[in-house]
Structures are given as C-alpha cells and as structure tokens.
Image (spheres, rainbow, N blue to C red):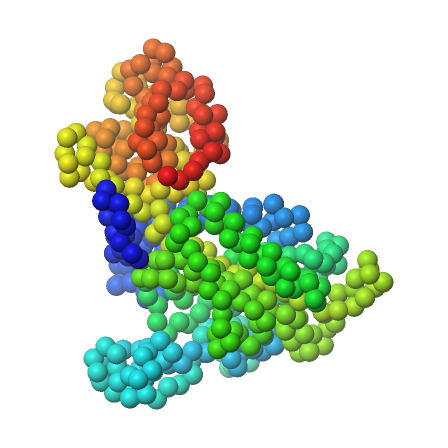
Amino acid sequence: MAEQKNADSREVSMEKITSLAKRRGFVFQSSEIYGGQAGAWDYGPLGIELKNRIQRFWWKEMTQLHDDIVGLDAAILMHPKVWEASGHVSNFTDPLVDCKKCKSRFRADLIDEKKLAAKTCPECGGELTDTRKFNLMFKTNIGPVDDGSGQIYLRPETAQGIYVNYKNIVQSNRMKIPFGIAQVGKAFRNEIVTKNFIFRTCEFEQMEMQYFVKPGDDEKFFEYWRDQRWKYFEKLGVRMDKLRWHQHGKDELAHYAKDAYDIEYEFPMGWKELEGVHNRTDFDLKRHQEVSGKDMQYIDQDNGNERYVPYIVETSAGLTRQMLMILCDAYDEEKVADKGNDDDWRTVMRFHPALAPITVAVLPLMKKDGLAELAQDIRASLKEDYATDYDQAGAIGRRYRRQDEAGTPFCVTVDYDSKEDGTVTVRERDSMEQKRVHKDELLSYIRDRIKNYKRA
C-alpha cells in the first residue's frame, strides 16, 4: 500500500494489523498453545462480532433489499457426484513444486517464469522438483468402515449447493426468472501456501449469490450486478480510492465463464482480489442435468411455457477476506498532540458504526459516589438497541484510547453533573469531539449519528 500522505498519520502494515488483532481480541492463531495450525484462525470476542456484522450487512443487502433474492443454507457434505459434475474432482488443482534444498513449497504459477524454467528455488536458489498437480479438495470418509467406498469431500465452494437446489426453490417458493439465491457458509481448500494472515486460509466462509436469468439477458444483468456490488462497498464506508476493477483476460477466464471481473482492494501487501462477479452461462446447470439425469430447465409460464436452462450471474465474496479488508481500511494512527505532547499518537479503528463490534462504551468518571451505578443503569437502557461495553478502570483518557483501538464509535462518560441534570458527555471516535446529551435522548441521538455517518 502506498504510504499515507497525511503527515499526521502513519503507514499501515500487516504486522500492525496482526498485532492489533491479537491484542484486542479480533483474531487468534488456531491452537496457539501447541505452536499454531497453519492456515487456520480463531475469531475472538471482537472478531466474531465484526464478522457477524459484516455477514448481516451483506445478507440484508442481498435478501432484504432485493425482493427477488431468497436465502439458502446447504449442507457442507454433498454427494460426491456433485463435485464430479462441477469439474472439481478432475480440474480443481494448483501446480505444485518443492525445493529439494530448503524444503519450501510453492505454487508454480506464482514463481518467476525464468526461475521455474531453470528449476531454481526463489528462496534459496536450490533445485526445484518437477511441477505436479495438487487437488485442493479435502477428502474424508463417511460411514463406519474406511475402505474407500465412503469417500466424501468437504465442499470447496458454496455455489454448487445453490445449483442442486435451484429447482426445489423455484417450485417451493414460486420464483420467477430473474431471481437470485444467496448463501453464506463454510468452505474448505487444501491450499499449497497460506499466508497474509486471514487473506488465504484452508477454512473460510463465502458469501455468494447466484442470479438466474433468461439466456440473452445475461449481459444486462451482469452489468447490473457489477454496479450493485460497487455500491455495496460505498455503503460499507470503505475508502473507494482503495478499490478498483480487474477484468479477467482470456488466459484468466475459467472454462465456464463468459466474462468475469474482480473487485480488488489495495491491501498492505498490494492489490488483491476481494470479490468476483462472473457470468457463468448455463454451464453448471447443464452439467448437473447431464450427470444427474434430472431436468434442470425452467418453464417460463409468462412466456407460453417456454423451456430453457437459465444463465447464471454470480457474485462471490469471502467473508473472512472482507473482514481483513475492513480491518486494514479502518486502521489508522493519528497524531493528536494530547496535553501539549507534540509526539502523541493514537491507534483508532474507523469502522462504520453499523459494523463496529461495540457501538457504545459507558464510562463512569469515578467508581464512587453513585457514578458507577448510574453508568450501569444507562448501559442497561442502551443494551436492547446497541452492543455496549462498560469500563471503569484507569484514567478517562486511557479508557478512550482502549475504545479507539476496538473501533467503538461512541463513548458515554457519566460524571457528577450527570447526577444533577441527567446529562452525559458523548465523545465521538473519529473527531474526538464531545457533546452533552441528556441520558433520555441517548438512543435517538446515537441512532441519528449512525444513520448519517460519513467517514471523513
């Protein structure tokens, strides 16, 4: 990522993101007490809240705000023939090479072409093995005997669960084309190389929507969904100058795709794919029709019972990757020159208030004289509507800084005037401005500030 130009802010790095993520309870290394498990991460108290809020934001955008999209939660374990029909058994592979000297393992397509041709390790200069295909699907066994007859796969994507249920949803919910099916769920890929924190992992969550359209209308809806997905990130409150489109070239297109675009984000490690919009044509439904023997045609009753296999426009995003993007985008180190100290900095997570793991922190100025009890009462009045925190330990300035690191947009300070006139101090995270608000007006005040939030 290019260094931030503002002299009152500092550059963001993955090291800073991972350090804050652990320190504040966003993300932990899986099985850390045993040395950690590569490619696996655990989401702590703030992390699971942030992840769930991103998921709900996406789900609302797809299903609540689109009358023609319904939801699905398909099983992780599916009939093995699903993956034969989709091409995953034969084609879902990465090219793999190993270094005979340092024992490092690489994806061959990510090594410089000259070094690969010379079989030279990019790390130590040692000799590389021949390139071989490596299937990314995890295999397991179902049933009491592990003799190979019960071999089954952990799904590498959620889309196939939508395709095999498409006719069920058309019939049970009387869906008419064009319509979409949305799903959020776990997927598993035996990645050769997992790196960059939670960017690429073996276990992850996908947020996918498959939109079924009449053949010939696919290009129109492809452009519609490109526009919709761009607007989604505007609503999410991220810096739009950190996003760009990348169209897949002929050498990048999947065999089933007519057209494909990625939305890329400028992470600390450079521009990387964040989400894809793909025109998958009728490939998937026709393959399932061929292998299963079931008719996957749609009967268009509004058009003389015309029969056709729909084309599919797909939007596909990784929930955990989007969470990493939100962490990187929100992270800021700001020079505040507090109390006359010209070199005083604060670390602040500038989450959109709708995504922040904690919306409001209630802080009594002192533990005594009834301030703590009044603060707890105020917190109780906010709990039904907002995620709250309570902190009475340490100086008030230090408590503000802790909440800044957690990304809490509003801090409510209860002081001695609060006992007299019922007002409290509301401190806003981004501007650090403070305003006196009556405790009975807190709910409406915070609701209005969230609704009209604009990131500076």
Total marks drawn?
0
Tell me: 367 left or right of 204. Answer: left
Image location (x, y in percent) of residue 377:
39, 22
Image location (x, y in percent) of residue 83:
57, 74
Tell me: 340 left or right of 303. Answer: left
Quarter where residue 256 is shown: bottom right
Up-down relation of residue 388 to residue 255 (above or below): above
Image location (x, y in percent) of residue 331:
31, 47
Tell me: 259 left or right of 392. Answer: right
Residue at the extreme right of the image, as rendered = 304
Residue at the extreme top of the image, as rendered = 420
Tell me: 131 left or right of 335. Answer: right
Does residue 128 appear in this view? no
Residue at left 26%, top 59%?
Answer: 33
Quarter where residue 297 is shown: bottom right
On-image quarter of the N terminus: bottom left
Residue at left 48%, top 77%?
Answer: 251
Residue at left 63%, top 64%?
Answer: 219
Image location (x, y in percent) of residue 362:
35, 28
On-image quarter of the C terminus: top left
Does residue 87 appear in this view? yes
Q: Which of 34 and 409 is in front in this view?
A: 409
Up-down relation of residue 326 to residue 437 (above or below): below
Quarter where residue 123 is shown: bottom left
Residue at left 40%, top 23%?
Answer: 378
Q: Nearer the viewer, residue 149 or 52?
A: 52
Up-down relation of residue 262 to residue 372 (above or below): below
